[in-house]
Image: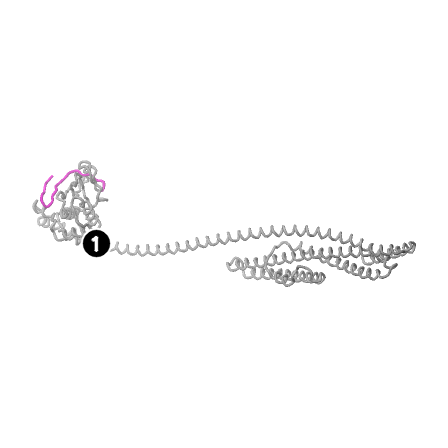
């Protein structure tokens, strides 16, 4: 290019010399030539400024490339963080972790080398522009250390680097030629004839340079468009990174949820193991109780044999007259009085008409929970006292009913009486009957609830059953004031 310009300039100078030799020179022509020379200098300065602005655009492009490299470097740091998390969670082995870590370190080293080269280019441009650029080198060096990144920008950035270097060298050559022409133009203006020929040569040269600068400006515009397109891609990559971060956060939340579920399962497993241990302990305890029960059953058989042997003697000693039957219901008995005081302790200002059912239900529930009612299937009649029923916490249905009737009499129920019936399966069973506020009640300590059998007398008697067996026949009834065979 330099040889072409030199030959072209030499031709123009020779051509100009011939023209000026053919044209007579006067003052007007000399001033015209000087004016044209000044115009050529102004035009040259204008295109020089434009070339400097174009170089600033190239500096901006290099700056964008540095930012892209820093973004890519930041992405590598994030990738390294993810690999560290995977290694910590045991998802990758030691060898895989070291291999991936070394690969990322090598990529970072290459990127840092490219960033250093770009910074050198920026320093060259700043030196060329006589420190007139808006770029602050300290700021560039500081920001170059920041972490940002797009993983797929390397190929485009390499292309821009090559183009920037090529234009830089070419513009440096043009500016050197313009500076030489300016110096040469100043020198030529000092002489008249030689100046005019040199100015014309400079004008031709400047026209050629203007065309080349115009072509360069077009190329810079193309690069600017490519830069804008590249920035759009950077934005797209940034959005993809944000989406990736969101998915990573979702994955972390899912992992945390699964860890919580796993912890819950571990706790449930621990509780289950504890429950299995408790069941095992209970089984051992039940085995011991079964052994004791078997021993008790053996004793019961022995006792039953003894009782059966002496049944006649027991019968003669335990048989009761009607008067003795009435005396079994005794609201004034010390044990009964103690129970009545217990059941009425939570009721202040007790009144039979308003508080009876509340106290009676409390007595019913306590006796039902604390007295074990057993079938009276011995061959002879045998009666436990009220004190024995409470202390031993056991009795037949008749003995338990006598205790309940005594308590009800103690809280003011004059209608309470013990009733013994024959069921349709041929067995005897006893309970307490009473009336309160024109309602008929059957209180059976082996029933499900205090209010299971109450209402109209005939309806209640038809409804009543014990273990599914209905009343076949009433045998007798009694309380402390009356005894009746039915």
Where does label 1 land, which residue? 296
Out of 97 and 450, give the one closest to the viewer. 450
Highlighted magenta segment, given as a residue range: 467-486
* Quadrant containing the C terminus in the rendered view: top left
Classify mark 1: residues with Cα within 10 Å, few (<14), some (14-19) or many (20+): few
Question: Which quadrant holds residue 38?
Answer: bottom right
The residue drawn where x is 8% and y is 47% is 324
420 versus 297 height, above or below: above
Colouring chosen for the image of the structure: one colour
Residue 168 shows in this picture = yes
- Give percent across and percent down for residue 85: 52, 58
Q: At which x and y percent is residue 425?
A: 19, 40
Left or right: 108 in relation to 346: right
**Helix, strand or loop status at disc 1:** helix
Relative to 431, residue 31 above or below: below
Q: Is residue 304 magenta?
A: no
Task: Residue 439: name its quadrant.
Answer: top left
């Amino acid at each position: 290019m330099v040889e072409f310009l030199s030959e072209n300039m030499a031709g123009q100078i020779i051509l100009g010399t011939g023209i000026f030799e053919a044209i007579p020179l006067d003052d007007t022509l000399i001033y015209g030539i000087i004016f044209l020379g000044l115009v050529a200098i102004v035009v040259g300065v204008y295109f020089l400024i434009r070339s400097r602005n174009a170089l600033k655009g190239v500096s901006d492009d290099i700056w964008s490339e540095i930012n892209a490299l820093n973004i890519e470097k930041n992405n590598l740091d994030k990738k390294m963080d993810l690999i560290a998390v995977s290694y910590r969670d045991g998802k990758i082995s030691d060898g895989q972790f070291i291999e991936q870590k070394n690969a990322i370190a090598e990529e970072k080293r290459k990127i840092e080398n490219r960033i250093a080269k770009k910074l050198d280019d920026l320093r060259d441009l700043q030196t060329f522009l006589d420190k007139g650029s808006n770029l602050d080198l300290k700021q560039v060096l500081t920001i170059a250390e920041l972490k940002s990144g797009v993983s797929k920008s390397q190929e485009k950035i390499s292309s821009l680097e090559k183009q920037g270097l090529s234009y830089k060298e070419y513009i440096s050559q043009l500016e050197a030629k313009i500076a030489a022409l300016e110096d040469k133009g100043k020198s030529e203006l000092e002489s008249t004839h030689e100046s005019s020929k040199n100015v014309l040569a400079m004008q031709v040269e400047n026209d050629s340079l203007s065309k080349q600068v115009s072509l360069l400006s077009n190329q810079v515009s193309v690069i600017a468009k490519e830069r804008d397109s590249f920035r759009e891609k950077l934005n797209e990559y940034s959005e993809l990174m944000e989406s990736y971060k969101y998915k990573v956060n979702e994955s972390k939340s899912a992992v945390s949820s699964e860890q919580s579920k796993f912890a819950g399962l571990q706790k449930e497993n621990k509780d289950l193991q504890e429950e299995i241990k408790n069941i095992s302990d209970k089984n051992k305890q039940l085995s011991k109780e079964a052994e004791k029960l078997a021993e008790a059953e053996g004793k019961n058989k022995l006792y039953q044999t003894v009782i059966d042997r002496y049944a006649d003697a027991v019968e003669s000693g335990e048989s009761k007259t009607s008067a003795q039957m009435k005396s079994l219901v005794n609201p004034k008995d010390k044990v009964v009085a103690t129970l009545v005081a217990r059941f009425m302790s939570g009721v202040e200002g007790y009144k039979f008409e308003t508080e009876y059912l509340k106290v009676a239900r409390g007595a019913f529930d306590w006796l039902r929970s604390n007295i074990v009612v057993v079938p009276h299937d011995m061959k002879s009649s045998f009666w436990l006292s009220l004190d024995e029923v409470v202390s031993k916490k056991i009795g037949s249905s008749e003995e338990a009913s006598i205790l309940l009737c005594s308590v009800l009499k103690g809280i003011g129920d004059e209608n309470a009486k013990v009733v013994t019936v024959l069921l349709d399966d041929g067995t005897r069973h006893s309970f307490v009957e009473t009336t309160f506020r024109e309602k008929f009640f059957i209180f059976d300590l082996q029933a499900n609830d205090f209010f299971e059998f109450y209402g109209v007398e005939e309806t209640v008697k038809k409804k009543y059953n014990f273990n599914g067996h209905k009343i076949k026949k009433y045998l007798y009834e009694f309380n402390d004031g009356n005894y009746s065979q039915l």
